[in-house]
Image (cartoon, rainbow, N blue to C red):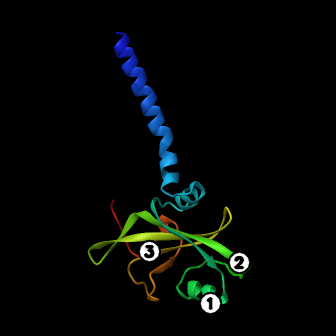
Amino acid sequence: MYKLLLLILSLLIFSSCSNATMDEDKQSIGIQKHHASFISAYGWAIQELSSTEKIKVYPLTLEIIQSSGANIGLHDYLGQELTKTSYTLSETCSHFHEDERLFVDIYGLESEIVGAHMSANIMNMNGTGILSLTTKENFTYCELASN
């Protein structure tokens, strides 16, 4: 009886520890909590961190981002260094009978999110694959594949 009680207690402790570490696991693979919350507010889910880089906002940077179709306002950050964090989304895009990955790029200054846009491996009308961030229910770029 004592061994059974000890076994049950051990299992309870182990299961509560594994549930508590789920958020920590996302943090350890680079998914920042405020980024995950930001994206989930649009109905999307982050699968994994793709990359993080520092970028300086120049007029040419703004022109490239805006000409690609991404509707983000980074004008207030001209000359400043931002952190661009790219994530692979859990959702995929059905395009010509193939599932294509969707990505989101989040621009931040310290811990503040200052802009974001989506992208796909497939070319859109402007030839870049860069898309404005929109809610999942209003997403019209392609048909979302069932995961």
Above-or-below relation of 141 to 46: below
| Percent position of residue 87, x then y | 48, 66
Q: Amino acid at mark 1?
A: Leu
Residue drawn 39% across the image and 77% down it: 121
Q: Which mark, residue 80?
A: 2
Which residue is labeled 1 in the image?
Answer: 60
Disc 2 from disc 3: Cα separation:
33 Å
Pointer 2 or 3: first along the chain: 2
What kind of element bears circle 1?
helix
Q: Amino acid at mark 2?
A: Gln
Q: Amino acid at mark 3?
A: Thr
Q: Mark 2 or mark 1, which is nearer to you?
A: 2
Which residue is labeled 3 in the image?
Answer: 140
In this rendered view, identify the residue nearer to me: 28 or 78.
28
Disc 2 from disc 1: Cα separation:
13 Å
Q: Mark 2 or mark 3, which is nearer to you?
A: 2
Pointer 2 or 1: first along the chain: 1
In this rendered view, identify the residue nearer to me: 30 or 95.
30
Quarter of the image with the N terminus is top left
- Label 3 Cα neighbours within 10 Å, binned few <14 / some 14-19 / many ≥20: few
| Residues at discs 2 and 1 in contact (Cβ within 8 Å) | no
Q: Which mark, residue 130?
A: none
Disc 1 from disc 3: Cα separation:
28 Å
Residue drawn 47% across the image and 33% down it: 16
| Percent position of residue 6, x then y | 40, 17
| Percent position of residue 65, x then y | 57, 83
| Residue furthest top in the image | 1
Above-or-below relation of 4 to 50: above
Q: Mark 1 or mark 3, which is nearer to you?
A: 1
